[in-house]
Amino acid sequence: MTTNSKKKLDAVPLKGEALLARVQELEHMSKEEKARVCGYYTVMGDGSERLNMMKFLNALIDAEGIELDGRSGNGNSRGGRSASFRISVQANGNLLIGSAYTKKMELHPGDEFEISLGRRHIHLKQVSSDAESEES
């Protein structure tokens, strides 16, 4: 047996709506059993089966339409951490928004904002450069 013949057969896994429907039907099973029934396993050369849990879980995430990597199809994501849209007050009392947000909003150094306080909200309104030129 050569090293290339270790994998003998890959199951054809369910995807999309078919996967979601089948998982719903199998609610009484463990996630491993669901993965196997939905076709997320490989039969090895010796006849043993290997579950492909990551492929199964990723297929579920895709089928649900959940976007985890922060990419919206624009293709300019460089990896790393993504914005969580949740921040904490720092020890010095400052709120740091961070570059993930400013990049997503296409903000640049020097862009200005008006700050207004609500009962439990801080509202930021970008001051447009058009408004500044009209005031001059």
Image: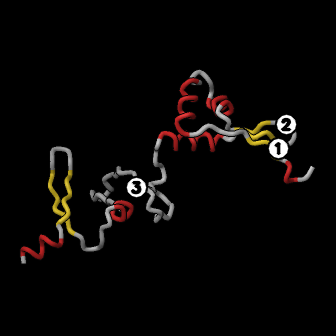
> Which residue is tagged 2?
47
Q: Which of 93 and 53 is in front in this view?
A: 53
Dot 2: element = loop
Residue 130: name its quadrant: bottom left
**Measured Cα–Cα span from mark 1 to mark 3:** 42 Å
Of label 1 and label 3, which has the lower sequence position?
A: 1
Residue 72 x, y percent position in the rendering: 43, 56
Residue at the farthest bottom position: 136
Residue drawn 82% across and 41% down? 44
Q: Which of 16 and 99 is in front in this view?
A: 16
On screen, 110 above or below 30?
below
Residue 55 x, y percent position in the rendering: 63, 44
**Viewer-nearest of discs 2 and 3:** 2
Label 1 with label 2: CB-CB less than 8 Å: yes
Left or right: 41 with respect to 24?
Answer: right
Residue 29: name its quadrant: top right
Dot 3: element = loop
Residue at the farthest right position: 1
Crowding around mark 1 (Cα neighbors within 10 Å: few <14, some 14 to 19, many 20+) is few
Q: Which mark is residue 8?
A: 1
Residue 69 x, y percent position in the rendering: 48, 53
Left or right: 106 with respect to 132?
Answer: right
Label 1 with label 3: CB-CB less than 8 Å: no
Dot 1: element = strand
Crowding around mark 3 (Cα neighbors within 10 Å: few <14, some 14 to 19, many 20+) is some
Crowding around mark 2 (Cα neighbors within 10 Å: few <14, some 14 to 19, many 20+) is few
Number of numbered discs present? 3
Q: Which mark is residue 83?
A: 3
Left or right: 57 with respect to 47?
Answer: left
Residue drawn 12% across and 70% down? 131
Residue type at mark 2 is Gly
